Amino acid sequence: MITLGETARKASRIIAAADTQTKDAALIAIAGELIAKQSDILVANQMDVQEAIQKGLPDALIDRLTLSSETISNMAEGLIQISKLPDPIGEISNLQSRPSGIKVGKMRVPIGVVGIIYESRPNVTADAAGLCLKSGNAVILRGGSESINSNKAIGKCLSAGLNASGLPQGIVQVIETTDRNVVGQLITMKDYIDVIIPRGGKGLIERITQEAQIPVIKHLDGVCHVYVDKDADLEKALKIADNAKTQRYGTCNTMETLLVHESVAEKFLPRIGDILFEKGVEIRGDEISQHFIPNAVAATDADWYEEYLAPILAVRVVANLEQAIEHIRTYGSQHTDSIITENESNAMRFIREVDSSSVMINASTRFADGFEYGLGAEIGISTNKLHARGPVGLEGLTNLKWIVFGNGEIRT
């Protein structure tokens, strides 16, 4: 691990100084390797999936683990998109002349070495590598044991692409052991790693947050809400609520609680209940919701806190916008929340007062994603209050330093 850290630190200096053309060429080369080695990646991934099934791992985890030709193409396309994004490194902003004669501004610079610990999702290996490379950072990737074969196969593509571009392979290093002690070492290597980004279950992220000796960018839960306001277009609300819950169950931006204004509950709830019931979604509702959705079962207080990552939805009827906002403040995880309304005043109040990393008006929570936000890909979603917040793309992997231009000025 120390050798990995030393290698990453040396490589970080090289990639920090690399020009945009070199970085983009490496991204394109890696994308080409992913497509060329697609069959090898799929074979490796099938080994991981079969082992996960044999171990009885949860369906949501297996869903995140599984790759296809389409997902590999999307991984490659994500890298191509990153190569087309403006390079933030070296960008100078807010340059101002001071009375002394000096000019003061800020320059965007890489963080340095990023350590990423993740579970299930092999696509993170390529996405994270691409974002770190373009933002001038070296990265150490530690995937979960359940995806070890997939990550190794993708790692070979990363190394080949870097090599073809004349960059050191130490810029991206995939840890190839499943030894659990590695995580404990990685999160304390403060001499070599500048920030840790965990992606995985709540248990993993809680452990890393508690034990890390390095700053952590993370989110614990994705308890996302959709609130159907009294002034909602109900046809629009039906489409959005359905998509937010059923487009994919095992993601952190999937709706887990539906809030409905009492004045539209009678019209809206039976219809959304039928749509979700036909798709096999279990609804856990409060007393009023159960009245309008006969198939609903009684929700407990614990359901309002729950990130199901499964075809289960909590539903509550609220008296007004204030109660919806208060519910989100009490039970939400500051991830993603959406209001469905045609009332501009209510919409603007919702986005001002709901303190989440993404707040939406008349849109599915499933859009809370780096690719959908135009970041090319994301390294994760942060609910931190400091530094990066929401989907973390290139800028979230950089920092700012003060720069001063002078011409012989001295302080008097």
Image: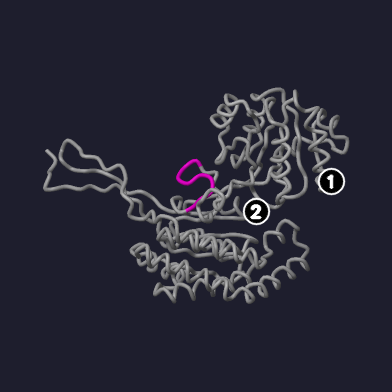
Residue beneath the point at 56% across and 60% down: 117
Q: Is residue 72 visible?
A: yes
Residue beneath the point at 79% across and 38% down: 272
Which residue is label 2 attached to?
201
Q: Is residue 104 above or below residue 172?
A: above
Q: Is residue 146 visible?
A: no
Q: CA distance from mark 2 to mark 1?
A: 29 Å
Q: Secondary structure at mark 1?
A: helix
**Picture quadrant where residue 83 is located:** bottom left
Q: Is residue 68 above or below residue 303?
A: below
Q: Secondary structure at mark 2?
A: loop
Circle 2: residue type: Gly
- Per the rendered image, the range of residues in magenta is 385-393
Q: Quadrant of the C terminus?
A: top left
- Horizontally, residue 251 falls left or right of residue 158, namely right
- Numbered badge on residue 278: 1
The image shows residue 162 at horizontal and vertical percentages of 45, 72
